[in-house]
Image: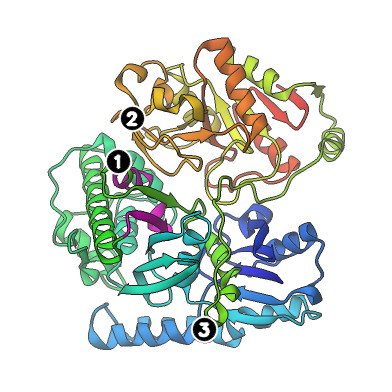
């Protein structure tokens, strides 16, 4: 069976993946190819990339699986919310809701644009409940036979949070908290209030939070227990002023790009603390309801690595798995496997140890691009050793190797790397390379074998999605990847998963005594992670990186 999984909702993060007999062969977000961050358009480029990689023609597809139900499900729920007053509603809201859902209905929920672009297909079209697709994406790739599965979203069609019990390859739905009682909505509205882009810049609030202190009470907006309750009417404000409810309570919102003051830091602290409390309460509820101490997480809120780390270190669970593309782009991973549940069937299951599911470029392809741009490059026999030596000499590198990661994290395939021992390196990379806010932390990639020497918990963290405390005696050793509160978001690198990247870190450790490197995504602020050699070269020459290690070639400025 050959199936194609899609995320397409006209909201954000369109994506596609392809699977043959239950094995995912390739997955990519549309933004990586279109170069438009969070691209919400029909994922034509991503679909073509999937078909090309797999050597599959459209007529060979058995199923095309969208990770959303028909638009009428969302429309009915929105109209119910307006009628009951659970969300602010007026004529403008009503017209906007009708227009958006009717537009998608005219597209036959995505089937029409697919058939227009791939008319030869004979596939069956399937529309999977959004939270079910999220739940499959977490459970089926966890390697766990028995697990509680929490999906925490901004919103699905009508869902906000849901709990599932995965057993013996099947998923049982336990309960759903409907939108607008949404933890994602709570975090997004305060992200907006703090002057950032909602449903995009939540990382910035999470990074800013450790600079603040306790003192702001947000219980008028969220009660984070049993397991949580948000005040949607306060959070959503009015159509003409969507932040009015927050402004009435807390004063004027921060204007984007203006100075961050103590009040903003303290509010970020309170927002993050409320999110952590609510997620811990949800974890307690999940374990109690399922009787299972294995926990899987998916949905955009599950990208909150600080809260994930708190759950992992709490003693509530024995094992935690967070699907690395937890946001809506990763929905395609669940949708593509949904046909296996037909007629009481079992989901295929394996333990996901890497997210290298995207495109790759051969040395021959890279060399052609270098020649096209008339760039001087050095061919090296051992890119890992060459990169390690440059890092030990204090250089900041672009690292472009192998298959691109799927999901928001750079995991040693499309990364910017630097020396974590330099206490000034954080500021250097933020200012001269990434061109982003001063408070944004960077993550350490470390050999899995030494993680316990540097990190107090979550020492199995291949996807850089769990935050933990750096051991006190190591904080001065790796200061540029230790946040102000002593935390870090580690990636533990295994030799058999990414041997080249593992060897780079080992070579750096041999030279410095510290088998850890600073790792951040290979992109500039506001742009997607680089995909092609051309993307990598353009980004390299647009920033303050010192060298680019691309395939077996080194380009220096």
Q: Is residue 173 shown left or right of residue 88? A: right
Residue 395 appears in the rendering:
no
Mark 1 in CB contact with mark 2 (< 8 angstroms): yes
Q: What secondary structure is marked by label 2?
A: loop
**The stretch drawn in magenta includes residue 295:** yes
Which residue position is annotated with label 3? 70
Report, in whole angstroms, how far the alpha carbon at label 3 lies from the one at label 1. Answer: 39 Å
User: Mark 3, mark 1: which one is toward the viewer?
Assistant: 1
Earlier-in-chain disc, 1 versus 2 = 1
Position in image of residue 137 (x %, y %): 51, 62
- Whichever of callouts 3 and 1 sits on the residue coming sooner in the sequence is 3
In the figure, 276 relative to 262: above or below? Answer: below
How many residues crowd around disc 2 within 10 Å: few (fewer than 14), some, or many (20 or more)? Answer: some
Position of the N terminus, as image quadrant, is bottom right
Residue identifier under label 2: 456
Instruction: Select label 2 or label 3 by which is in front.
Output: 2
């Amino acid at each position: 069976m050959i199936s194609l999984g899609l995320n397409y909702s006209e909201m954000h993060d369109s994506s596609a993946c392809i699977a043959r007999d239950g094995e995912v062969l390739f997955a990519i977000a549309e933004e990586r190819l279109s170069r438009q961050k969070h691209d919400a358009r029909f994922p034509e480029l991503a679909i073509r990339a999937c078909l090309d990689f797999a050597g599959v023609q459209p007529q060979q597809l058995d199923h095309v699986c969208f990770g959303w139900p028909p638009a009428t499900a969302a429309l009915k729920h929105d109209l119910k919310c307006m009628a009951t007053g659970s969300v602010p509603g007026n004529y403008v809201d009503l017209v906007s809701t009708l227009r958006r859902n009717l537009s998608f209905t005219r597209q036959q929920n995505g089937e029409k644009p697919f058939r227009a672009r791939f008319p030869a297909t004979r596939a069956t079209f399937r529309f999977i409940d959004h939270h079910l697709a999220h739940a499959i994406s977490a459970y089926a790739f966890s390697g766990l036979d028995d697990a509680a599965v929490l999906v925490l979203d901004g919103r699905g069609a009508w869902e906000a949070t849901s709990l599932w019990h995965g057993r013996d390859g099947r998923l049982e739905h336990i309960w759903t908290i409907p939108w607008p009682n949404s933890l994602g909505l709570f975090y997004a509205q305060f992200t907006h209030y703090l002057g950032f882009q909602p449903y995009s810049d939540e990382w910035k609030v999470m990074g800013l939070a450790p600079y603040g202190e306790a003192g702001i009470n947000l219980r008028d907006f969220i009660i984070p227990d049993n397991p949580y309750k948000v005040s949607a009417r306060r959070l959503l404000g009015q159509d003409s002023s969507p932040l009015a409810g927050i402004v009435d309570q807390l004063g004027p919102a921060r204007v984007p790009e203006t100075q961050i003051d103590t009040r903003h830091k303290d509010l970020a602290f309170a927002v993050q603390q409320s999110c952590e409390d609510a997620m811990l309460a949800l974890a307690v509820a999940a374990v109690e309801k399922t009787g299972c101490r294995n926990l899987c997480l998916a949905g955009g809120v599950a990208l909150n690595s600080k809260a994930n780390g708190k759950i992992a270190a709490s003693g509530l669970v024995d094992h935690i798995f967070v699907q690395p593309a937890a946001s809506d782009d990763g929905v395609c991973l669940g949708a593509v496997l949904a046909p296996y549940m037909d007629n009481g069937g079992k989901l295929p299951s394996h333990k996901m140890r890497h997210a290298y599911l995207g495109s790759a470029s051969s040395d021959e392809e890279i060399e052609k691009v270098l020649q096209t741009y008339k760039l001087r490059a050095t061919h090296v026999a051992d890119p890992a050793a060459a990169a390690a030596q440059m890092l030990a000499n204090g250089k900041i590198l672009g690292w472009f190797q192998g298959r691109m990661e799927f999901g928001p994290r750079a995991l040693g395939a499309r990364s910017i790397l630097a020396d974590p021992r330099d206490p000034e390196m954080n500021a250097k990379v933020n200012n001269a390379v990434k061109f982003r806010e001063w408070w944004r932390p960077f993550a350490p990639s470390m050999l899995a074998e030494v993680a316990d020497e540097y990190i107090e918990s979550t020492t199995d963290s291949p996807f850089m999605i769990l935050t933990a405390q750096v051991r006190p005696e190591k904080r001065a050793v790796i200061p540029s990847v230790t946040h102000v509160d002593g935390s870090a978001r580690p990636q533990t690198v295994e030799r058999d998963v990414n041997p080249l990247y593992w060897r780079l870190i080992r070579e750096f450790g041999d030279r410095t005594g510290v088998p850890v490197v600073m790792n951040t995504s290979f992109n500039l602020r506001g742009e997607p992670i680089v995909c092609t050699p051309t993307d990598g070269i353009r980004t390299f020459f647009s920033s303050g990186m010192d060298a680019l290690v691309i395939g077996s070639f080194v380009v220096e400025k």
